[in-house]
């Protein structure tokens, strides 16, 4: 019989946490320096405008350049660290099984699994269902606030707070299938979705994983993938076998 002491478990957890910090620290420090630089408004506008003129297409959301709030704050650093940690530990990876996390439907408040509720109206409804999962706020009014946000929503303290906030989103995209993440943020953690992220799932596997938003949020990439998939489906149906 092997007996593992509580001290050994705590030591293992401490070592794991230290290893995580060492792996994430370079990327985190780079992001922190960038946030500090962006606090100089003249630099911020030039950098963000250049980003907006770079990669991407007309479907991609425009880069915000008017937010004059401070970027280098304790709340922003916490948010960046949290997002990078979720991305590092996410369970969703291209080619692997899609995490079937628990979500709550906004309209009837029914508890569902994410793979069981993918439907909705879109121009790709003939080849794909759509689902919008509302997670925790990236820029809550009592956290890393953004003056350019169309709504000032505080951090969700309970499931009712998240449901009320998601109703605002549903009103912007009527006819869409909108669900919310549970208060333990299981979908956010499994998919590394913070701040925002696009996925395509097929046969319960991840076949497309977009970059972390906002800079990696590319609707044009998702559209290109779906267009290619539709083209492949049509080609497979019209293929002629020559003997």
Image: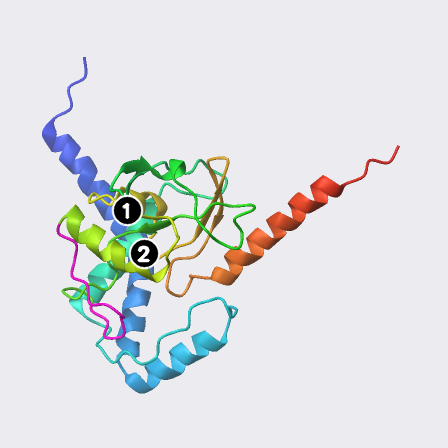
Q: Is residue 156 magenta?
A: yes
Does residue 23 lie above or below 27 as drawn?
Answer: above
Q: Residue furthest right?
A: 243
**Residue interval drawn in magenta:** 145-157
Which quadrant would the N terminus be assigned to in this image? top left
Element on which disc 1 rests: loop
Q: Position of residue 134 (x, y in %)?
A: 30, 52
**In magenta segment, residue 201:** no
In terms of secondary structure, where does tag 2 sit? helix
Q: Position of residue 192 (x, y in %)?
A: 34, 49
- Report the residue at 23% width, 75% height from top: 147
* Mark 1 neighbour density, 10 Å: few (under 14) some (14–19) many (20 or more): few
Quadrant of residue 112 within the rendered picture: top left
Q: Residue at x 26, y 54 (%)?
A: 166
Task: Say if mark 2 contacts mark 1, CB within 8 Å.
Answer: yes
Tell me the residue at 45%/54% (across/down). 210
From the viewer's perspective, tell me whether residue 188 is left or right of residue 119: left
Q: Which residue is mark 1?
A: 107
Q: Could you tell whether 101 is left or right of 200 in the image?
A: left
Q: Which residue is mark 2?
A: 170
């Amino acid at each position: 019989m092997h007996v593992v002491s509580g001290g050994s478990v705590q030591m293992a957890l401490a070592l794991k946490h230290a290893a995580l910090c060492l792996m994430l620290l370079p990327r985190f420090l780079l992001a922190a320096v960038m946030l500090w630089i962006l606090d100089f408004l003249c630099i911020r506008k030039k950098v963000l405008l250049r980003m907006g003129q770079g990669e991407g297409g007309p479907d991609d959301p425009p880069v915000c350049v008017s937010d004059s709030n401070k970027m280098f704050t304790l709340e922003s650093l916490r948010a960046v660290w949290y997002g990078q940690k979720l991305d590092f530990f996410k369970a969703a990876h291209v080619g692997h099984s899609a995490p079937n996390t628990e979500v709550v439907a906004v309209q009837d408040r029914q508890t569902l699994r994410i793979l069981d509720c993918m439907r909705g109206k879109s121009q790709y409804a003939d080849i794909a269902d759509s689902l919008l999962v509302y997670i925790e706020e990236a820029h809550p009014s009592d956290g890393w606030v953004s003056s350019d946000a169309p709504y000032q929503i505080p951090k969700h303290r309970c499931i009712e707070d998240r449901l009320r906030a998601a109703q605002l989103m549903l009103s912007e995209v009527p006819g869409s299938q909108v669900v919310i993440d549970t208060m333990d943020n299981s979908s956010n953690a499994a998919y590394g979705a913070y701040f925002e992220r696009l996925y395509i799932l097929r046969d319960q596997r991840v076949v497309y994983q977009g970059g972390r938003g906002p800079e990696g949020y590319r609707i044009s990439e998702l559209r290109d993938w779906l267009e290619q998939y539709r083209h492949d489906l049509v080609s497979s149906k019209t293929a002629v076998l020559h003997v």
